[in-house]
Image (cartoon, rainbow, N blue to C red):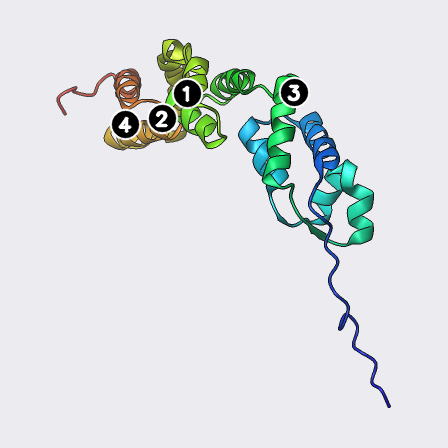
Amino acid sequence: MEVPPRRGEGTPSVTSPGLDLRRARAVALDLLARKAWTCHQLHRRLARPGRAGARDRLALSALRSHLLHRGRGRRGAPADVADAVVTDLAARGYLDDRAFAAAWAESRGSGQGLGARRLRAELRARGVDRDLVEAALTGVAEVEETRARLLAARRLPALAGQRPDRVARRLHDYLLRRGFRGSVARRVVASACREAFPDLDPAS
């Protein structure tokens, strides 16, 4: 007597085909409707192969029905398709790395209190061209020390009760982690500690 195969045995896994130009463009527009992307980020996202989780599949409305009915696998777009989509969307103004960099520097700099060094690293990690990054950070140096002083003033209460040398060290490290230059961090820490410990002998 023939033994029926176990559940799942003998049934090839179903994997959706790679994205063609039409579907890749639909996916790209869907992603851009949700947040801003750099050209580099969107290209990587379109070309990224692998298995898509339920949340990822549902986010891609252009492929929703296809993926949920054909299986859990998903292949990215071929490199030439991703290139074509990104180039077309950039030409139409949907993608603009210069505007992305300027908005990122403003929101992360003013909103999160980050220094130029940290902002530069974040933008470069997102594939923004070096010249565009530097252009976006042109005005940051002018306000960096003021921004660092505000952060230091907000941070000092959390360090209350500690030795002056420990306060200085921790405050300096904090500003460096936020992306401020070492020279800025040193000046700000020295000023903050003079105000916090007015009776401290500067030579001690």
x and y, in percent, of residue 32 in the image: 67, 27
- Mark 3 is on which residue type? Tyr
Marked residue nearer the N-terminal end (3 or 1): 3
Residue drawn at the location 35% of the way across and 23% of the way down: 180
Q: Do callouts 1 and 2 mark residues in contact (Cβ within 8 Å)? A: yes
Pointer 4 residue: 168
Which numbered tag is attached to residue 151? 1
Look at mark 3 in the image and give the residue it sits on: 94
Point out which mark residue 175 bears: 2
Q: In x, y percent, where is residue 9? A: 75, 73
Q: Are marks 2 and 4 in contact (CB under 8 Å)?
A: no
Q: Secondary structure at mark 3?
A: loop
Report the residue that reaches farthest toward the left. Answer: 203
Q: Amino acid at mark 2?
A: Leu
Asked if the residue at tag 1 contacts the one at tag 3, i.e. Cβ–Cβ closer than 8 Å, the answer is no
**Residue drawn 68% across and 31% down?**
28
